[in-house]
Image (cartoon, helix red, strand yellow):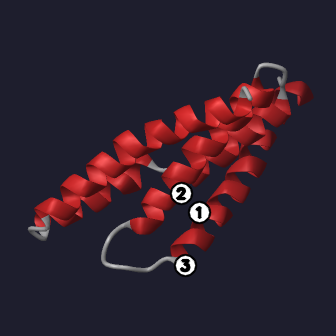
Amino acid sequence: MVVGSVIPFAAVAAGGALGALARFSVYRTVETGFPWATFIVNIVGCCLASFLMFRYGIYADGPVKTMVFTGFFGAFTTMSTFSIDTVNLLTDGAYWKASANIVMNSVVCVGGAICGRYLALL
């Protein structure tokens, strides 16, 4: 393997470690009967990733961009946990909470990405 081809993997690993630690910190801080921690990491991640992409992403390239977007945000935000949280709410008969979770993580997170883009282009 050529050394240059290792750099993107190392960048993703480093960013992923930082993103996973950040996400874990939110989960340790926010413990309730509703999956607020998942919602928080998703909305913050969508807004911040969009802001950074539209402010700096078109100029950035290489390992830093790979570390931040693929590594950090890939580990920080989470579709799988959102899906499992929703299934657990449905299984528990908490249909309104499950519906709210779906709307919040879909509509609000896309709104966060729009907001991040808007702020970046100011």
* Residue at 49% over, 76% down: 30
Q: In the picture, residue 55 is in which quadrant?
A: top right
How many residues crowd mark 2 within 10 Å: few (<14), some (14–19), many (20+)? many
> What distance separates the C-alpha of mark 2 from that of mark 1?
7 Å
Q: Is residue 39 above or below residue 64?
A: below
Q: Is residue 14 shown left or right of residue 113?
A: right
Q: Is residue 53 above or below residue 88?
A: above
Considering every residue shown, the one lying at the far top of the view is 58
Q: Which residue is mark 3?
A: 28
Residue kind at label 2, given as amino acid type: Val
Among numbered discs 3 and 1, the one appearing first in the sequence: 1
Q: Is residue 67 shown left or right of residue 45?
A: right
> What distance separates the C-alpha of mark 3 from that of mark 2?
12 Å
Coordinates of residue 36 in the picture (x, y in percent): 41, 67
Residue kind at label 3, given as amino acid type: Arg
Q: Secondary structure at mark 3?
A: helix
Among numbered discs 3 and 2, the one appearing first in the sequence: 3
Q: Which residue is mark 1?
A: 23
Q: Secondary structure at mark 1?
A: helix
Q: Is residue 16 shown left or right of residue 6?
A: left
Could you tell me if the residues under marks 2 and 1 are in contact, i.e. CB atoms within 8 Å?
A: yes
The mark closer to the camera, 2 or 1, is: 2
Numbered label attached to residue 41: 2
Q: Is residue 2 above or below residue 51?
A: above
* Residue at 15% over, 61% down: 96
Q: Is residue 81 shown left or right of residue 9?
A: left
Which corner quadrant holds the N terminus? top right
Which corner quadrant holds the C terminus? top right
Q: In the picture, residue 59 is in which quadrant?
A: top right
Q: Nearer the viewer, residue 88 or 36?
A: 36
